[in-house]
Amino acid sequence: MTSPNFSDDAVDPGAYDPAALEAKWQQRWRELGTNHTDISGGDRPFYALMMFPYPSAEGLHVGNLFAFTGNDIFGRFHRQQGHTVFQPLGYDAFGIHSENYALKVGVHPMRLIPKNIANFRRQLERAGLMIDWRYSLDTTAPDYYAWTQWVFLQLYNRGLAYKKKAAVNWCPSCKTVLANEQVVAGACERCGTVVEQRFLEQWFFRISDYAQRLLDNLERLDWSDTTRMAQRDWIGRSEGAQVRFSVAVAPGATTDATHLAVFTTRPDTIFGATYMVLAPEHPLVEQLTTDAQRPAVSAYRERSARQDIVSRKTTKEKTGIFTGSFALNPATGKEIPIWIADYVLMEYGTGAIMAVPAHDERDFEFATKFGLDIVRVVAAEGEDAGTPLDAPFTNDEGGHIVASAQFDGMPVAEAKAAITQWLSGGEHATPVTNYRLHDWCISRQRYWGPPIPIIYCDSCGAQPVPVADLPVVLPDIPDFKPDDSGISPLARHAEWYHAPCPRCGKDGRRETDVSDTFLDSAWYFLRYPSVGHDEAAFDPSITRKWLPVTSYIGGNEHAVLHLLYARFITMVLHDMGHIDFEEPFTRFRAHGLIVRDGSKMSKSRGNVVNPDQFVEQWGADSFRTYLMFLGPYEEGGDFRDGGISGVRRFLERLWLAARVAHSDGVPDPVVQRKLHQTIAKVSSDIPRLSYNTAIAAMMEYMNTLRKGERVPHRAEVEPVVQLVAPFAPHIAEELWERFGHSASVFDSGWPAFDADLAREETVQLAVQVNGKLRGTLTVVPHITQDDAVAAARAEPGIAKFLTGEVRKIIFVPRRLLNLVV
RNA sequence: GCGGGAGUGGCGGAAUUGGCAGACGCGCUGGACUUAGGAUCCAGUGGGUAACACCGUGCGGGUUCGAGUCCCGCCUUCCGCACCA
């Protein structure tokens, strides 16, 4: 394996054998504790967190490895920069996903999960990640979920956990309640089954109380913009007014209600409100319905109650029915009909709207279908109240008010405030802010989760389990399959189900719901550095040192759910004095997605990359480096099997260069310059996660070194070993050792950048004539404009385009000269 | 429908602030070495031309000495959300 461009006296370097040397270093790291973090003593703590995986039976997905490798590079780089880096990894092993799989293969999750975890652990170690396994965790271990239950109790004690009967998303296939976030286009996120509505008693967390704070804090977080935007949209703040409409009782209606409240963001259009609509579930529907309309209204309500959420939310066609009653428009004093329709949702605003068909898409469609009045009250420039509308005019920026008494001519923005003010004089309106964010339903009528630590007592009611009694251990029962009763499988296990009331000691019954997996992951980052501390969820002094998390990397699929819940739980724990920060993740970056040959990897396509196979064939170092070379880390990339060979070749060349390098004489100045440019490039690329270009820069350097056609000098190779170490840790350790170092390359620091050595003696100056490239000059960097022009004129290839008088000269030092003739 | 990305060679992708478009890699072509080559090395590789010219960053306009990059109007595509008043 010699190469003609290194001289004949090159020693036989020995072949690069990744399998052997990677095994050697993985064992060495284990033995020496190289990846261990000095939790109590280390300086400059750097908590490099990655989202923990769900340990599936299929093993590690290449997407997991892509995510982890990116974090690993970031962590290793900062370690070389002198930080004490803490890079833990655990397993998010509770939840419907595992439970469904366990049901499918007929193996109990308590048996299945440990097997999966062992397999993951093997694969993760094989990938060469710098993980301190002493601080791993598993959300299904009682010594972890004891503290998940503790977190629940904190919220409970704070009045932030409550139980209510609620319309919930019920998946008939998974036989469980889903969070709104787990319903995708009306179907179950996990199995794709159409979701139904059911009414069940559920535990909720009052995350909506924190909506404004969750929104405000976004401004000061160093997070990916897309993620912050997704959270902002999810919280969905909207400003408007609550307006009260007097009810005019119609014959046969039994109402004693005098008012109906609506929420609107367009109080400026109230003169155009020609009817009202209530959600079918609205509590006043019954009373407002007249005798004549009662049969039709009841039929409509029943139909929409039965209807699954899909057709309710995706059907375009509007439906609805008149209640027979009227309300008074507080602005016009006119009677307007009250309808019910399922396009109005009970869970948002007040469950009732004032309909302004002229200025709202949905109201327009509804009014057109049912022949209701459409009254224009906003006009664009050059229009007036009489300008016909063939579509609703919904723009709330450019228009002015018409047909609205004293408000005519007022710009919309101004009218919003003025009309609210005017209505509030008669106590008809109040400014109100609404959020789309709903409270977090954390109950699951399933088996595979942490039992919610509550005991129901006939005398004392719901009682929290005392902290000293935690964990409420999930019993190992063979029959964990859910049925469609809506009662958790745990209720069938009498021995577990019956427990004494913590307050009076009489017979009580345990809460049989388990909590949402998202609760497990909403606080796990607090646990890692305190793993092993049995007295508390997290040790106060360790937590002060290590948290908040310095850097968090994960998938954007968790942009709203997980990240929002984690922020919320952190805020609550902060407010209760358990921690001194209220935002858990100082910096967050979302990584991209890996596709294969241009399309998403899926089992059905049969294009899933098996990491084991690639690691075995090419080595972990090549595989890691290739994953990072595919594309920008934050955008993901396209995995093509052939591409890995280029990365492997690069590592082979590094191997060869390091093995033949000698330390006689001095390094070549040209190579030296390129080296320092490469150090600068890699050092600035890694912090911004531009791994692909960092790798390209190192490849370029190796090309420069090869082109030298001489045996490389040790000083030309040794620093590259340090640069490549975060990407390809095993080969780096091996070469570092062969250079005679006894300590790990990761404790060797980072190559120093020398600007003087990096500086070019000449630069290429592009010469344009009328903006078109006509030649290139090799000049000293500080050349003056006049000298540059003279040099350009002396160049025949350029001069021939200088046909007339030069009218203008644009000179950009070091870059370009443009002569305009 | 709304919100947010993204459109650059045969392919993945480069191009901090407007300043030599196509770095790096794959693939491909030719060559060297070889019993052999899916190994290794060397050379070439946006289109076009004998060589220039010229044409090239989804499409159409614009600003500028100069536009992949900025502005206006479209098209395509991916990902969220999906009747949120």
Image: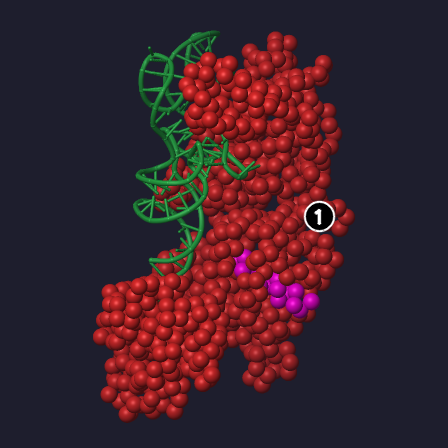
Image colour for chain A is: red
Q: Quadrant of the N terminus of chain A?
A: top right
User: Can residue A479 be seen from the camera position used here?
Assistant: no
Residue interval drawn in magenta: A562-577
Residue A514 at what x, y percent from top left?
52, 67
Which one is nearer the viewer's eye here, A354 or A325? A354
Inspect the magenta stretch and tell me whether residue A572 lies in it: yes
Dominant SS in magenta: helix
Inspect the magenta stretch and tell me whether residue A476 lies in it: no
| Residue sitting at x 47%, y 60% | A233
Residue A445 at what x, y percent from top left?
47, 68
Please indicate whether residue A516 sits to the left or right of residue A502 in the image: left
When the figure is inspected, residue A204 is found, relative to residue A743, above or below; the finding is below
| Residue sitting at x 63%, y 14% | A711
- Asked where in the image residue B76 lies, by quadrant, the reply is top left
| Residue sitting at x 69%, y 28% | A754
- Asked where in the image residue A310 lies, by quadrant, the reply is bottom left
Circle 1 SS class: strand
Residue A347 at what x, y percent from top left?
42, 72
How many numbered marks appear?
1
| Residue sitting at x 31%, y 78% | A275
The single residue placed furthest to the right in the displayed view is A41
Chain in green in the render: B
Residue A288 at what x, y percent from top left?
33, 86
